[in-house]
Image (cartoon, grey):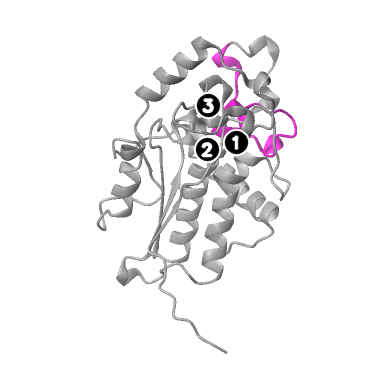
Amino acid sequence: TTTVATKKINVLMNNAGLAGFTLRQLTKDGFEKTFQSCYLGHFLLTARLFEEDLLNNTPENDGCLVINISSMAHNGAIITQNTSKESSDKEEGFVFGMDFNNLNSEVAYTPNLVYPQAKLANILFSKELQRRAQGKSANSWLTAVSLEPGIVATDMWRNANDFGYDPRTPRKPHQINNLTPEETQKTFLDQIYSFLLYSVMTPVERGANTQIWLASALPGDIQGGKHYDHFRNEKAVLDFDESKECAKLLWEVSEELTGIQFDL
């Protein structure tokens, strides 16, 4: 038996994600691709690293900081079963929150439905992770936060038809969505729209500023369970982001979906 010395993780940043698929797509695990890549995979990775004792659990060495990337889009997380044609054009007709009856987009799918849900899930996950860590010890070794980095010009938007396509990427929409070039043909106006859109987005070089600031923050500079904006300010969230009941239920459902028991 060979023992390998492993340096434990001080900062875990769950930043991966895909979005904007015109049609609902499933991963090989059977989950909707945006929801798995933007949230469910983060939950599983964090749980597995904890299970393997790879997160720094010594408070005297500042412990471990878990950073979950959300988005300002989480404000638009709609519960689809409460939406009707009569109320679809009225904000007061929508009910916002975690749509537990449509987590895998079985009931309804559009890119604009699933992405906010996944990003809301990251906020709820961060808050529940912090609560459970503090519940185990007043001097918790774990700090969990979420953030929204602003609208960053990464190539994750290459799948979104309403965004046109990033003129910087060599891959065209039909190569990504398995459609013919004719089915994804962009007009001259579409191309102008794409150029203008990507020119006003936050450049990638600045898009990780808040993540880097949080990852390098000194003890006391940030507070566990809080949400931060792209100006590095602690940001108040809406009532449905603060729901302890929803956060607890999401944790339990995530355990069931991933097949792992995440006991801090």
Question: Horizontal placement of 157 versus 21: left or right?
Answer: left
Question: Horizontal placement of 69 versus 175: left or right?
Answer: left
Give, as a three-letter code, the residue at label 2. Leu
Q: Whole-percent x and y of residue 196?
A: 40, 18
Instruction: Label 3, secondary structure: give it.
Output: helix
Labelled pair 2, 1 in contact (Cβ < 8 Å): yes
Labelled pair 3, 1 in contact (Cβ < 8 Å): no
Is the residue 71 above or below the residue 125 in the image?
A: above
- Quick one: label 2 or label 3, which is nearer the N terminus? 3
Q: In this view of the protein, can residue 264 be seen by the observer?
A: no
Q: Nearer the viewer, residue 216 or 245?
A: 216
Instruction: Label 2, secondary structure: give it.
Output: helix
Residue that carries the numbered disc 3 in the rendered image: 76
Q: Whole-percent x and y of residue 237?
A: 42, 34
Give, as a three-letter code, the residue at label 3. Gly
Residue that carries the numbered disc 1 in the rendered image: 98
Q: Nearer the viewer, residue 57 or 168?
A: 168
Q: In this view of the protein, can residue 195 be seen by the observer?
A: yes
Give, as a three-letter code, the residue at label 1. Met
> For the point 55% across and 33% down, which residue is it?
171
Viewer-side label of 3, 1: 3
> For the point 58% across and 45% down, which residue is it?
37
Residue 92 covered by magenta stretch:
yes
- Quick one: label 3 or label 1, which is nearer the N terminus? 3
The stretch of residues the image draws in magenta is: 90-116
> For the point 43% across and 60% down, which residue is it?
134
Q: Residues within 10 Å of mark 3 (few under 14, many from 20)?
A: some
Residue that carries the numbered disc 2 in the rendered image: 120
Q: Nearer the viewer, residue 8 or 248?
A: 8
